[in-house]
Image (cartoon, rainbow, N blue to C red):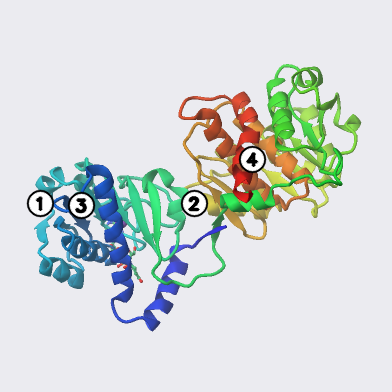
Amino acid sequence: MQGIWTTERIREAEGRAFAVTPDGELMRRASFGLSVQIADVLAEHTGTVSGRRVVLLAGSGDNGGDALWAGAFLRRRGVAVTAVLLGSRAHEAGLAALKRAGGRVVSAEDGPQWIARADVVVDGIVGISASGSLRPEAARLVSLVEAPIVAVDLPSGVDPDTGAVDGPAVRATRTVTFGALKPVHALAPSWCGEVVLVDIGLELTDPDLQRLDVADVAAAWPVPGPEDDKYSQGVVGVAAGSATYPGAAVLTAGAAVRATAGMVRYAGHAADVVRAQWPEVIATGTVADAGRVQAWAVGPGIGIGSEGRDVVRYVLGQGLPVCADADATTIIAKSPEVLDARDPDTPLVLTPHAGEYERLMGRKPGPDRVTAAREAAKKYNAVVLLKGHVTVVAAPDGRAAVNTPRGAWLATPGSGDVLSGLLGSLLAAGLDPWLAAAMAAHVHSLAGAIAAQNAPTSSSALVHAIPEAIRSIRSLLS
Ligand SMILES: NC(=O)C1=CN([C@@H]2O[C@H](COP(=O)(O)OP(=O)(O)OC[C@H]3O[C@@H](n4cnc5c(N)ncnc54)[C@H](O)[C@@H]3O)[C@@H](O)[C@H]2O)[C@@H](O)CC1
Ligand SMILES: [K+]
């Protein structure tokens, strides 16, 4: 697991580190690491370091200080460094160091001509003390940049704790952060670019947010043992689709088939179509006839009428883990009494997108999606997987995981049905529901990247890419 800490926790850790390190030492570590990364981006984009031109956009706080000190280090490698000072003042020691090293310092007014000739621009405008979007002067200079941007700690203008952007912000090629990952790095990947973590010796435990490593998914993925048969690995029940919309049934059941070696049962009006597509699925007309399962994936395409409501109520009443997706979420939002059928100790995973979230909670998720997911998890005593470009998975006990996607190809019809089938199969295997949801999101986005390979894809292709995704994850173990 990768840990991610809020800026408040980072400040506390910095406070503890300050107390035991000589004055200026943390900034020296940070800015030296930063200078190495700036040189690396220079080399990557121009082929050389010495003789190249770097412009530092330096705000008045320590983020600007990091940039100015990094500029001083780059001077030693023969880089022409120009600092453009923003705000009322500059970090004094950093400014002095840059000047001593032979760096040029100019006002914001003179910035444009230097920015026009820069090979790399460094965003040292604001760091973890930022609030709101870029101020007009900074926004104007940033809009002129054509060179790659290296962001110091985080891209300025993006909220450090939520990743939200509500005005001008920096879009970085690379973000060099210090000590630990902050929420912005996981929640705003398209603004951060590649994120590089420089160790400055902060000590942090109990992360506020987590992100699964490939190794975590590999280690926890259920694998049949020699004693297992088709039942013992967990039988997944899929209640999805309708006679008019059989596609959701085929995709949800198909994802379950591809994600597990165990048995998949289907119940609903699309039984014939499901059987034709997936002969290995045991398909029946109703959930009551489905036979024994260890978990249910319910909802995609079942409709939100009384029949759908009866299906959701039945499934919730079985004392088994349930992934309630799509129409099932809307049914739960509109008729919360269906939840009375549920034993509160049995795992429930809700998988709303923003619109379904609004139905469940009576308000939009808003810019702080992690808090939004946590609040819904508390209210429903369920794991909530809040869909979006970045997926957030929160548990009622406060655990939260983020899945940072690879590209945006997954925004394709039926993609959610696939996630539902994946999640159902992990619940049937007996995994902790929060971990199951985070793992399903991880494999889903990897399968999406495999299916897409930088071109549009479809949910059917996504289903077929699931084994390849699992294989590539598990190959880490061999
Ligand atoms: N504290 C530490 O131990 C370390 C901090 N480091 C750096 O210090 C940074 C934090 O520095 P500071 O706390 O001085 O603050 P920042 O440099 O993040 O911000 C400076 C000031 O800018 C103002 N401001 C807020 N939002 C703004 C906006 N949108 N536009 C313009 N101005 C805005 C605020 O008055 C704020 O205090 C970190 O992000 C990191 O880069 C590193 O040197 C590593 C060590
Ligand atoms: K910055």
Please say if the residues under marks 3 and 1 sit with CB atoms less than 8 Å apart: no
Residue lying at 68% horizontally and 27% vertically, measured from the top left = 251
Mark 2 or mark 3: whose residue is earlier in sequence: 3
- Residue 386: x percent and y percent? 59, 44
Please say if the residues under marks 3 and 4 sit with CB atoms less than 8 Å apart: no
Identify residue type, mark 3: Val
On-image quarter of the N terminus: bottom right
Residue lying at 55% horizontally and 50% vertically, measured from the top left = 402
Q: Where residue 49 is drawn, which disc sits there?
A: 3
Ligand 2 shown in quarter: bottom left
Which-is-in-front pick, marks 1 and 4? 4
Q: CA distance from mark 2 to mark 4?
A: 31 Å
State left or right for residue 332 relative to residue 177: right
Q: CA distance from mark 3 to mark 4?
A: 41 Å
- Residue 269: x percent and y percent? 80, 21
Q: CA distance from mark 1 to mark 4?
A: 54 Å
State left or right for residue 51 relative to residue 215: left
- Residue 340: x percent and y percent? 81, 47
State left or right for residue 17 relative to residue 235: left
